[in-house]
Amino acid sequence: MEISFSFVEWMVPFIVGLTFTIFGSLKLYGVVWGIEGGRDKPAFQYVCGTRPSWKSRGARLALPLLFLAIGLGELCWAAWRIYTAHYLG
């Protein structure tokens, strides 16, 4: 069965979705475990941590949840695009 859409139509949203989902998950992990980030920290703490100046828990949760929503949305869109092209013609 031939797939009638280009590689770019599903691969770009897949890569963007995967990147945002992984980054959002790492940030959420940092918020839950209280990892403090910053410019002078090691790479893991830099990626997972939140700035100490963000006093509000809502502000610290908003960014990871936004990244997760964007990432999962892009992954769902890519999966739907592949499904409709493959099964619905």
Image (cartoon, rainbow, N blue to C red):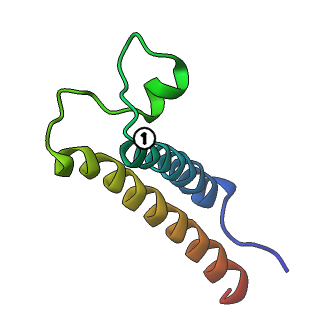
What residue is at 60 percent from the left and 71 percent from the top? 79
Give the x, y percent position of residue 89.
Answer: 68, 86
Give whichever of 1, 74 is nearer the camera.
74
What residue is at 35 percent from the left and 19 percent from the top? 38
Give whichever of 89, 48 is nearer the camera.
48
Quadrant for residue 33, please give it: top left
Identify the residue at the far top of this view.
Answer: 40
Q: Is residue 21 above or below residue 80?
A: above
What residue is at 46 percent from the left and 47 percent from the top? 29
User: Is residue 7 left or right of 62 when viewed as pictured?
Assistant: right
**Label 1 sits on what residue type?**
Gly
Give the x, y percent position of residue 45.
Answer: 47, 26
Mark 1 lies on a secondary structure that is helix
Quarter of the picture holding the N terminus: bottom right
According to the picture, the residue beneath numbered tag 1 turns out to be: 30
Identify the residue at the far bottom of this view.
Answer: 88
What residue is at 36 percent from the left and 44 percent from the top? 31
Give whichever of 32, 8 is nearer the camera.
32
Q: Is residue 35 above or below residue 21?
A: above
User: Is residue 15 left or right of 72 when viewed as pictured?
Assistant: right
Identify the residue at the far right of this view.
Answer: 1
**Category of crowding for the residue at label 1, using alpha-carbon neighbours closer than 10 angstroms: few (below 14), some (14–19), many (at least 20):** many
User: Is residue 67 left or right of 16 when viewed as pictured?
Assistant: left
Give the x, y percent position of residue 5.
Answer: 66, 67
